[in-house]
Amino acid sequence: MIIWGVLGLALLTVLVVLAVSLVRSGLGVLREVSAAGERVGELSAQVERLPPHPPASPAVLEDPVVLRRERLEHLRRVRKVRATTTALRRAQRAATPVRRSATARPARGGAYDGRN
C-alpha cells in the first residue's frame, strides 16, 4: 500500500512540474507575440508616413512596335558585347604559347589536343 502512495505522489509531482513548465512556456510565447505585434504596429506607422509611390506604367499597354524595337536593340547590344568578349578571348588564346609536356599524353577521356 505504501508503494502505491509513493507512486501516486511521484505522479502528482511530475504532473505539477509539467504543468508549471507548460504555463511558463505559454507565457513566454505570449510575451514574444505581444512584442512582435508592437513592432508590426511601429512598422505600419512608418509605412504610412512614406510618400506615395507613383504607379508604374504597365508595359502591356505600351505600343508593341516600340517595345519590340527596344527589345531588339537590347539584344543587339548583348550580342555585340558577347562577340567582343569572344574575340578578346580568342586573341588571348592565340597569343599564349602552347605548353607541351615532356610526355604528350591525351587528356582524360579525350585525344591529345596540343594544350596539355
Image: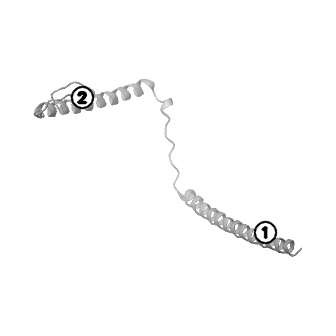
Secondary structure of residue under mark 1: helix
Sequence-wise, which precedes: disc 2 or disc 1? 1
Disc number placed over residue 116 in the picture, else none: none
Name the foreground residue: 17 vs 23. 17
Classed neighbour count for the residue bearing mark 1: other residues with Cα under 10 Å, few (<14), some (14–19), many (≥20) = few
Name the foreground residue: 95 vs 46. 95
Q: Vertically, is 97 above or below 3?
A: above
Q: What residue is shown at x 78% (from left), y 73% (from top)? A: 13
Q: Quadrant of residue 78?
A: top left
Residue type beneath disc 1: Leu
Residue type beneath disc 2: Ala
Q: Is residue 32 left or right of residue 84?
A: right
- Applied colour scheme: one colour
Q: What residue is shown at x 80% (from left), y 69% (from top)? A: 11
* Image mark count: 2
Which residue corresponds to mark 1? 15
Q: Name the quadrant of the N terminus.
A: bottom right
Classed neighbour count for the residue bearing mark 2: other residues with Cα under 10 Å, few (<14), some (14–19), many (≥20) = few
Q: Quadrant of residue 37?
A: bottom right
Spatial CA distance of label 2 from label 1 is: 76 Å
Q: What residue is shown at x 37% (from left), y 26% (from top)? A: 69
Q: Quadrant of residue 91?
A: top left
**Residue 115's x, y, as percent?**
16, 31
Which residue corresponds to mark 2? 83
Q: Name the quadrant of the C terminus.
A: top left
